[in-house]
């Protein structure tokens, strides 16, 4: 199995594979880790938090030229089509580490040559190919063509993959900060986003990237932060800026928010104990997107703690996802739904 991750975090992915899942790591490079054998449940989505994509039973391909690589990948794909009928769009995903200067051009050239080979043999199937990773709540198992280059003359190719969800998101010129991209990406992982009329509380909102993300969808946001809002969040009619301490803000009696957002630069155990736990335990929110910074703690130990029986996620939000997003840095993004609190129908917009 070949696992991909954000470049620079492959050592943490390798540790997580070995220490949390018992996998045997064979080698690693910028943004990828190769594992000798899959562990139970991986095909159903039991991926490490640092993993973005898992190529299942990949085949190694080596070649000195574009045509050699394209021919080998094309033959692998066409051989795998025998006895298989494809009538719906399928993913053709080509990736490789951007840290290798010039590799992107090599990938594009091999992809184009391979696509032409497939088009000549099975034009109807080729027309159904798409470059986008599948979307959906939780890890998604997909069948198609998945290619990951580890060098200019070496790649791994598979027909099946488990897609964890993280991916590059498009920026918005009105977004107050790059943190906007993180919550946009979190919606993909969770499989749902704020709806018009839903109520959102954003704790530690400034400069307002997450608040703006919800408000631009028509949600009504209470942005809690002593700092100022900027960009598209400043003066937005659907954002109520409260200059208060995020740890001391509580809903009114009987009040429940549809979404809790929290991206505080605070010690993660402090955020878990003094903010996340009361909000989940008391049912003050239905869904949540929370970032936990691990820059000053051991991230693998923190990940184990989040899965422990006494964790607020285990107790109040079973099924919550802990992921390291494409746009994350030294932080985990935690998304989930509070147990027993099904999302309420959205209120009509004013």
Image: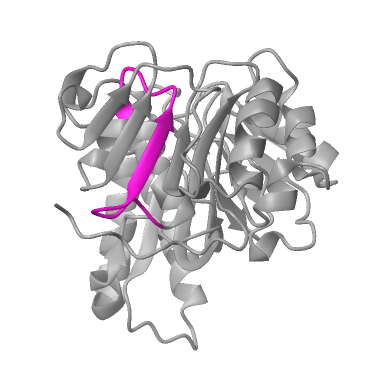
What's drawn in magenta, residue-wise? 192-210
Q: Tell me if 83 is positioned left or right of 40 in this view.
A: left
The secondary structure that most of the magenta stretch takes on is loop
Instruction: Report the residue at 54% width, 44% height from top.
Output: 52
Q: Position of residue 138 (x, y in %)?
A: 54, 58
The picture quadrant where one finds residue 102 is top left
In the displayed structure, would residue 261 be above or below residue 82?
above
Give x and y (percent) for residue 24: 82, 44
Residue displayed at 50% across by 44% down: 253
**In this rendering, does residue 272 appear at all?**
yes
Say above or below: 5 vs 178: below
Q: In front: 168, or 250?
A: 250
Would you say residue 68 is visible in this rendering? no
Indicate yes or no whether the magenta region holds residue 53: no
Residue 239 x %, y %: 24, 32
Q: Is residue 324 left or right of residue 123?
A: right
Q: Is residue 197 magenta?
A: yes
Quadrant hosting residue 40: bottom right
């Amino acid at each position: 199995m070949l696992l991909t991750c954000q470049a620079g975090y492959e050592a943490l992915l390798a540790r997580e594979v070995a220490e949390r899942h018992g996998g045997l790591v064979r080698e690693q490079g910028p943004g990828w880790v190769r594992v000798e054998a899959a562990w139970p449940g991986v095909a159903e989505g039991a991926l490490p938090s640092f993993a973005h994509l898992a190529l299942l039973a990949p085949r190694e391909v080596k070649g000195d030229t574009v045509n050699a690589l394209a021919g080998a990948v094309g033959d692998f794909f066409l051989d795998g089509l025998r006895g298989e009928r494809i009538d719906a769009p399928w993913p053709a995903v080509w990736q490789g580490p951007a840290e290798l200067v010039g590799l992107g051009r090599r990938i594009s050239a091999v992809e184009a040559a391979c696509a032409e080979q497939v088009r000549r043999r099975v034009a109807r199937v080729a027309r159904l190919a798409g470059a986008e990773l599948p979307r959906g709540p939780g890890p998604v198992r997909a069948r198609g063509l998945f290619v990951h280059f580890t060098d200019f003359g070496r790649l791994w190719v598979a027909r099946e993959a488990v897609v964890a969800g993280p991916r590059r998101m498009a920026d918005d010129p009105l977004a107050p900060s790059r943190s906007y991209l993180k919550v946009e990406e979190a919606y993909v992982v969770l499989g749902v986003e704020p709806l018009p009329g839903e109520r959102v509380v954003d704790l530690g909102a400034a400069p307002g990237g997450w608040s703006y993300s919800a408000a631009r969808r028509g949600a009504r946001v209470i942005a809690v932060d002593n700092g100022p809002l900027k960009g598209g969040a400043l003066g937005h009619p659907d954002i109520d800026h409260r200059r208060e301490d995020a740890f001391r803000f509580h809903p009114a009696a009987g009040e429940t928010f549809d979404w809790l957002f929290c991206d505080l630069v605070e010690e993660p155990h402090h955020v878990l104990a003094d903010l996340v736990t009361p909000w989940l335990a008391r049912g003050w929110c239905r869904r949540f997107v929370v970032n936990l910074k691990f820059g000053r703690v051991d991230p693998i130990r923190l990940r184990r703690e989040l899965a422990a029986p006494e964790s607020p996620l285990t107790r109040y939000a079973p099924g919550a996802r802990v992921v390291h997003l494409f746009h994350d840095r030294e932080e985990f993004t935690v998304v989930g739904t509070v147990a027993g609190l099904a999302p309420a129908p959205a209120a009509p917009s004013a």
